[in-house]
Image (cartoon, coloured by chain):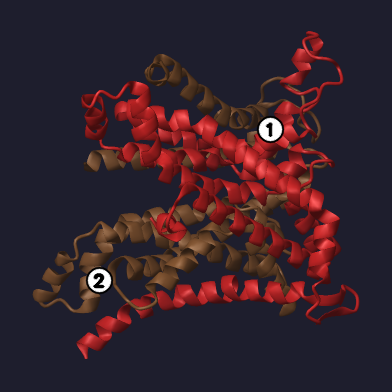
């Protein structure tokens, strides 16, 4: 009987209910970006308007926080993308002494509680009297993203056939040429996926940033600071635009993958 | 020459990233351990005195928050397994060619900032908000009924925020099950229930394990949900650590509590792995 229950239409409806639950707060966020509220507070529905899309950048420090977030996310994507890919390539392709220890460090960095990571990094900065701000946030974001990129690239590298590289070498290509013309194109989808993951992790991070930001604001930190006094509708609009951009990139990505296959 | 190069290559590839992790991940942990054993105060500075007091003081002062964190972490993780398993099962076996669409829908929350999603819940659940406002004006719930500032709100928020991390690994494990294994079970006259309990469930356990690993740690150490949805009486150990580090700047106590949290999480995971009969936690996790 239970097996039958798991197969039936009930389970499909249940899945859609869970999806609705997951999406509900996003719908609320999007809806209240269109709320014709007066003044700064956005609590009760007052009617539909597009005016907040026009006044998107009117709160100077919120705009600055968003710019900081985007800049840090792009830099994290580049730095962690390269460093993590190199680690992923090494772990996926070569057998060497110390690879077990490296895998252990990756695992520890991925499963470590964010608050512990953030607090320990702050301990280091406090001990060395490093001033907190943009650069310490960037350092922390690269730190927690590297392992995610490495694991993503390692998974890609492990599925590849190394005989193609041997063939390139047999045909007289040097190590750099082999890497550039054979290895890199093959692992590139993994590198892209890992880098995009780093971007996403960075732009959304709150906990580690909260510990290592000093007075510098990122988008999530600004929202956190404003909760006590109420969020202005511009936050909803920015959240909506980031969400829309993410959906767009994912859909385009999926369509391109479908066309290739 | 070329052989030497080949043996050095992996180390050269590892070097820059490993250096970054060593300086900003491994060394800070040691620094924090040393901080937790120091004594002094924020005005006069701290000195290393091998002082265990911070651990004793921290744990005796904040044992309520420590226990509450573990309880909330366990309950929200169990909730996620219960809520998520049927979803993972249905997508893996009945998703057909629309599997990736369903997975995409499950991942949609990650396109909105974690803090913003939680605040959106606070807004939706507030005492006279979108949900309770109409219910109260219709007289369906009493006027003083509230969801925010209860432990249920915090646990619900934790379960909500980490659910996709639970569903995805369970889905991956279920999706890997070879349909021929299920046919074999039926050929051997297993009922549907028996097939589920003795074939599907055991084969899905690595996924459940990976899911627990990815959700129990962030849920137990979280302070965003407790602070946004829980009011003042449901604070977790994360709130205390954040407050001691960033507001009071009492680094020894804050570090000692961070270390205690880390130790508890490690013990929790290993005990769970042992109970599950997993031979080597790291081996499973490394996959």
Residue B244 left/right relative to B162: right
Query: What residue sits right under mark 2 in the picture?
Result: A179
For image coordinates 71% across by 80% down, the residue present is A128
Chain bearing tag 2 is: A
Q: Residues within 10 Å of mark 2 (few under 14, many from 20)?
A: some
Query: What residue sits right under mark 1 in the picture?
Result: B121
For image coordinates 47% across by 24% down, the residue present is A15
In this view, the residue in front, A1 or A188, is A1
Chain bearing tag 1 is: B
Q: Nearer the viewer, mark 2 or mark 1?
A: 1
For image coordinates 68% across by 37% down, the residue present is B155
Mark 1 lies on a secondary structure that is helix
Position of residue A171 relative to residue A148, above or below, is below
Considering every residue shown, the one lying at the far left of the view is A171
Colour displayed for chain A in the image of the structure: brown
- Quarter of the image for residue A92 reads bottom left
């Amino acid at each position: 009987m239970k097996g039958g229950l798991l197969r039936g239409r009930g389970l499909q409806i249940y899945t859609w209910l869970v999806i609705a639950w997951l999406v509900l707060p996003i719908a609320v966020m999007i809806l209240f970006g269109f709320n014709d509220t007066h003044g700064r507070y956005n609590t009760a529905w007052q009617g539909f308007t597009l005016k907040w899309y026009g006044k998107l950048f009117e709160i100077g420090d919120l705009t600055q926080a968003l710019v900081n977030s985007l800049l840090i996310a792009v830099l994290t994507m580049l730095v962690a993308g390269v460093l993590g890919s190199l680690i992923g390539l090494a772990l996926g392709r070569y057998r060497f002494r110390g690879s077990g220890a490296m895998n252990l460090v990756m695992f520890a960095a991925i499963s470590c509680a964010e608050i512990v990571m953030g607090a320990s990094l702050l301990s280091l900065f406090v001990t060395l009297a490093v001033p907190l701000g943009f650069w310490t946030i960037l350092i922390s974001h690269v730190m927690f993203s590297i392992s995610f990129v490495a694991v993503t690239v390692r998974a890609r590298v492990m599925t590849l056939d190394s005989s193609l590289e041997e063939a390139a070498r047999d045909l007289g290509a040097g190590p750099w040429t082999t890497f550039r013309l054979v290895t890199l194109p093959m692992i590139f989808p993994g590198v892209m996926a890992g880098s995009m993951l780093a971007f996403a992790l960075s732009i959304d991070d709150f906990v580690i940033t909260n510990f290592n930001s000093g007075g510098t604001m990122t988008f999530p930190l600004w929202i956190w600071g404003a909760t006590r006094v109420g969020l202005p509708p511009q936050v909803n609009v920015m959240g909506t635009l980031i969400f829309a951009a993410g959906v767009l990139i994912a859909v385009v990505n999926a369509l391109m993958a479908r066309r290739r296959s | 020459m070329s052989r030497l190069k080949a043996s050095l290559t992996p180390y050269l590839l590892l070097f820059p990233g490993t250096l970054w992790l060593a300086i900003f991940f491994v060394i800070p942990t040691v620094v924090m351990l040393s901080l937790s054993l120091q004594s002094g105060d924020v005005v006069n500075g701290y000195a290393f005195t091998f002082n265990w007091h911070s651990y004793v003081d921290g744990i005796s002062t904040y044992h309520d928050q420590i226990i509450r964190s573990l309880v909330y972490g366990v309950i929200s993780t169990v909730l996620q397994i219960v809520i998520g398993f049927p979803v993972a099962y249905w997508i893996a076996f009945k998703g057909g060619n629309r599997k990736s669409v369903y997975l995409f829908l499950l991942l949609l929350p990650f396109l909105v900032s974690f803090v913003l999603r939680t605040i959106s819940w606070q807004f939706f659940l507030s005492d006279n908000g979108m949900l309770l406002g109409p219910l109260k004006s219709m007289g369906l719930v009493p006027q003083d009924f509230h969801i925010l500032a209860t432990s249920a709100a915090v646990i619900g928020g934790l379960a909500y925020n980490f659910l996709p991390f639970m569903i995805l690994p369970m889905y991956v494990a279920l999706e890997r099950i070879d349909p021929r294994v299920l046919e074999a079970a039926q050929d051997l006259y297993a009922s549907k229930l028996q097939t589920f309990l003795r074939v599907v469930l055991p084969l899905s356990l690595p996924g459940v394990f990976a899911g627990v690993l990815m959700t129990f740690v962030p849920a137990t150490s979280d302070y965003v949900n407790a602070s946004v949805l829980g009011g003042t009486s449901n604070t977790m150990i994360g709130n205390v650590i954040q407050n001691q580090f960033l507001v009071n700047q009492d680094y020894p106590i804050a570090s000692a509590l961070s270390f205690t949290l880390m130790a508890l999480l490690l013990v929790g995971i290993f005990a769970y792995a042992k109970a599950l009969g997993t031979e080597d936690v790291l081996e499973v996790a490394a996959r």
